[in-house]
Amino acid sequence: MTLAIAPALQQARLAATLAALGSGARVRIHGGERPIAGADAPAPALAEVPLANPPGVIAGGKIVLAAADPKGVLIAHTGQAAWARIVDGAGQWLLDCDVSGPAGAGDWQLAIDGLPADAPPTQMYEGGTFTLGTVTLA
């Protein structure tokens, strides 16, 4: 059986999550092993995407995140994306999730354009551009 939540409670939960993100929230894409919830990342983020203000909207029972710059951000380090962290404007941890390529089982599926044919689907290259795409939180 799955968890069933009353629509009013789900809406309140989404509104509280959106409020917690607040102004200055960011999505950090990391490689390597994901640490325990909220622990320091073992390495710098491969890319960091500032979110818009407000950071998203509630639509269809989900939060749809919006990047501050839809054209993307510069990838800071080369590596394979494995997990992501969302932090608020003060850099405080809010949530972590697994990422995968488009056909993977990650919480978020990344679609990275311009990869060589033999590259893993989550490969990021320093100096390249990463766009957030459509990311939803339920």
Image (spheres, rainbow, N blue to C red):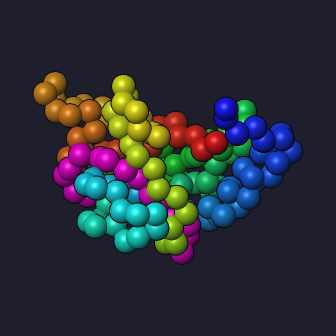
Q: On the rendered structure, is 39 left or right of 45?
A: right
- Horizontal and vertical percent for residue 99? 39, 43
Q: Which secondary structure class fits the magenta region best?
A: strand
* Residue 43 position by quadrant: bottom left
Whether residue 6 is visible to the viewer of this picture, yes or no, is yes
Query: Residue at 67% of width from left, 35% of height from top?
Result: 2
Residue 138 as seen in the image, left or right of residue 133: right
Q: Toward the viewer: 27 or 8?
A: 8
Give residue 101's quadrant in the image: top left
Residue at horizontal 84 percent and vertical 41 percent from the top:
6
Expressed as whole percent of the image width and height from the top left, the position of residue 133 reads 47, 37
Q: Residue at x 57, y 46 (%)?
A: 66
Question: At 66% across and 64% down in the image, what residue appears?
Answer: 20
- Rendering coords of residue 113 (x, y %): 30, 32
Check the image and report above or below for 10 versus 105: below
Q: Quadrant of the N terminus?
A: top right
Q: Considering the image in quadrants, where does the C terminus appear?
A: top right
Q: Is residue 48 visible?
A: no
Magenta stretch holds residue 83: yes
Report whether 46 appears left or right of 61: left
Examine the rendered structure and indicate whether residue 119 appears above or below residue 88: above
Part of the protein shown in magenta: 76-90
Point out residue 136 in the picture as x, y percentages from the top left corner: 58, 40
